């Protein structure tokens, strides 16, 4: 059997990691020199201690095949299920190390009888579960977004936020001061599109976008 490492992370510098240290040393029997700690927000995944364990593009990982990484909770591996799955795969597949999650006893990739097939099966099963959870998480977020948009009132062709009372999405581009006159001259072929946009100080894409928007806004009622 290889070495046993412990990894501890607390989200804020003010949080006390002592409970995790006690569990790692007393319950799991891990020597303090093999326990690595990060104090960083989950939003910031640039973690020195964690990267020392799993390695980066420029550094060699401390974890090797046959080693065991003990963490208190699965969320210590990443900020979301997708990231957790990627880290789990990196540790168990790429590095060939095992993982034990203290608060989820089923998430322990060590084989109980030396059967590598069993170990691989457990790791794959966990990956599938995490993948499913990630997909469901994305679907639930999208569903909530659609429900929120559907419940919004429509004012002037735009959805209005129930919380702020303001229209959602990008604001419509405003017309330059001389737009009606220059637009009419362009449509009557008195000037070219290049001349029109130069007179208005617009980029080509903005000019044509405003032209389409203007034509839609001023479309005759009997043609709709």
Image (spheres, rainbow, N blue to C red):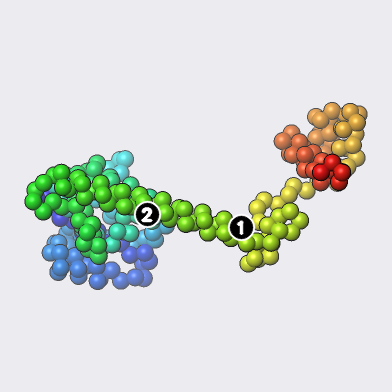
**Mark 2, residues whose alpha carbon is within 10 Å: few (<14), some, or many (≥20)?**
some
For the residues labelled 1 and 2, the Cα–Cα distance comes to: 24 Å
Q: Residue at x 19, y 52 (%)?
A: 109
> Horizontal placement of 208 versus 122: left or right?
right
Q: Which residue is mark 1?
A: 149
Q: Residue at x 13, y 51 (%)?
A: 111
Q: For the C terminus, which image quadrant?
A: top right
Q: Nearer the viewer, residue 27 or 34?
A: 27
**Residue 172 in view of the camera:** yes
Task: Assign a secondary structure to mark 1.
Answer: helix
Provide residue 42's location: percent of width, then percent of height.
39, 59
For the image shown, how many numbered marks are present on the structure? 2
Between discs 1 and 2, the one toward the N terminus: 2
Q: Quadrant of residue 223?
A: top right
The circle on residue 128 is none
**Residue 91 in view of the camera:** no
Q: Residue at x 41, y 51 (%)?
A: 135
Q: Quadrant of residue 145?
A: bottom right
**Mark 1, residues whose alpha carbon is within 10 Å: few (<14), some, or many (≥20)?**
some
Task: Assign a secondary structure to mark 2.
Answer: helix
Position of residue 119 relative to residue 151, above or below, is above
Provide residue 110's location: percent of width, then percent of height.
15, 52
Q: Nearer the viewer, residue 86 or 123?
A: 123
Q: Which residue is mark 2?
A: 133
Q: Nearer the viewer, residue 8 or 134?
A: 134
Q: Find out whether the residues at labels 1 and 2 contact each other: C-beta distance under 8 Å.
A: no
> Horizontal placement of 99 versus 168: left or right?
left
Q: Nearer the viewer, residue 191 or 47?
A: 191
Q: Quadrant of residue 34?
A: bottom left
> Horizontal placement of 163 versus 23: left or right?
right
Provide residue 179's location: percent of width, then percent of height.
85, 42
Provide residue 142's location: percent of width, then percent of height.
51, 54
């Amino acid at each position: 059997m290889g070495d046993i490492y412990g990894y501890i992370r607390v989200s804020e510098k003010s949080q006390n990691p002592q409970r995790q240290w006690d569990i790692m040393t007393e319950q799991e029997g891990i020597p303090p020199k093999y326990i690595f700690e990060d104090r960083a927000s989950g939003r910031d995944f640039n973690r020195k201690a964690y990267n020392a364990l799993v390695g980066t593009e420029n550094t060699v990982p401390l974890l090797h095949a046959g080693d065991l990484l003990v963490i208190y909770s699965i969320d210590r591996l990443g900020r979301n299920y997708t990231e957790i799955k990627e880290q789990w795969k990196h540790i168990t597949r790429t590095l060939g190390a095992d993982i034990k999650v203290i608060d989820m006893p089923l998430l322990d990739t060590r084989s109980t009888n030396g059967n590598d097939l069993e170990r691989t099966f457990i790791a794959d099963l966990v990956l599938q579960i995490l993948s499913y959870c990630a997909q469901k998480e994305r679907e639930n977020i999208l569903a909530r977004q659609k429900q929120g948009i559907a419940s919004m009132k429509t004012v002037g062709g735009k959805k209005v936020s129930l919380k702020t009372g303001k229209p959602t999405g990008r604001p419509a581009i405003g017309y330059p001061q001389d737009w009606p006159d220059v637009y009419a001259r362009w449509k009557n072929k008195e000037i070219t599109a290049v001349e029109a946009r130069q007179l208005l100080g617009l980029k080509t894409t903005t000019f044509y976008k405003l032209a389409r928007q203007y034509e839609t806004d001023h479309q005759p009622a009997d043609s709709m």
